Image (cartoon, rainbow, N blue to C red):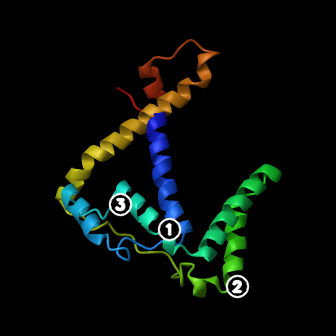
Amino acid sequence: MTGYLTGLGISVITNQFRRILGAADIEKLGLSAFGQQIQETMASSVNTTGYFAELIVLFKSIPYLNLYSVAVGLGTMVFIRWMKKSFPRIPAALLALVLMTGVVAIFSLDQKGIQVLGAIPSGLPSLSLPHVPLLDYLRLLPGAIAVVAITLCEGCCWSAAPAENTIPKRTAIRCCSATAWRP
């Protein structure tokens, strides 16, 4: 379980560092053919490039980094860490979002290479199902089952950990029952 969560964290932080650096996308660095090859290997309509393509893009984009983006990204991380340490009851991430939105707007950093969302449409989006072929649902099913199994195992680990010192050891069946799965 620890390995899975560590891998997930590494994947997320790699993607976020690329965004903090203001790094170019795969297409801008000429790696779109590499991403297309990976997608064809998966034989799915799911648009992905994979972790190693993300890592290659991260390293290749370092010479093209945007210093404004780096300053805002690192400043936000430092601010959140400081807020959590100094004022733990205040929602640091929300305050950082509002503060950095103001900084970007006041200094017109969007014109200096920082990507912003732009205009956000008002109102609720219409409710609809994604247009994914049935065959792709079947291809995604093993991964979905794996996610359910990992979530179930993680729930079992977390529910058993505090009880080890106070209650007799729980069995796997009781642990699964605690997460609303009945065999």
**Mark 1 or mark 2, which is nearer to you?**
1
The reply to whether callout 1 and callout 3 are in contact (CB within 8 Å) is no
Q: Quadrant of the C terminus?
A: top left
Residue 101 falls in image quadrant: bottom right
Q: Amino acid at mark 2?
A: Phe
Q: Which residue is mark 3?
A: 53
Q: Nearer the viewer, residue 179 or 25?
A: 25
Q: Amino acid at mark 1?
A: Ile
Numbered disc 2: secondary structure: loop
Q: Position of residue 176 (x, y in %)?
A: 43, 27
User: Left or right: where does residue 161 sit relative to residue 155?
Assistant: right
Circle 1 packing at 10 Å, graded few (<14), some (14-19), many (20+), is some
For image coordinates 63% across by 83% down, the residue present is: 109
For the view shown, which residue lies furthest in the front direction? 63
Instruction: Give the numbered dot on residue 62.
Output: 1
Mark 2–mark 3 distance (CA, rounded to whole Å)? 33 Å
**Mark 2 or mark 3, which is nearer to you?**
3
Q: Which residue is mark 2?
A: 107
Sequence order check, earlier mark of 2 and 3 = 3
Q: Amino acid at mark 3?
A: Ala
For the question of whether residue 147 can be seen, the reply is yes
Residue 34 falls in image quadrant: bottom left
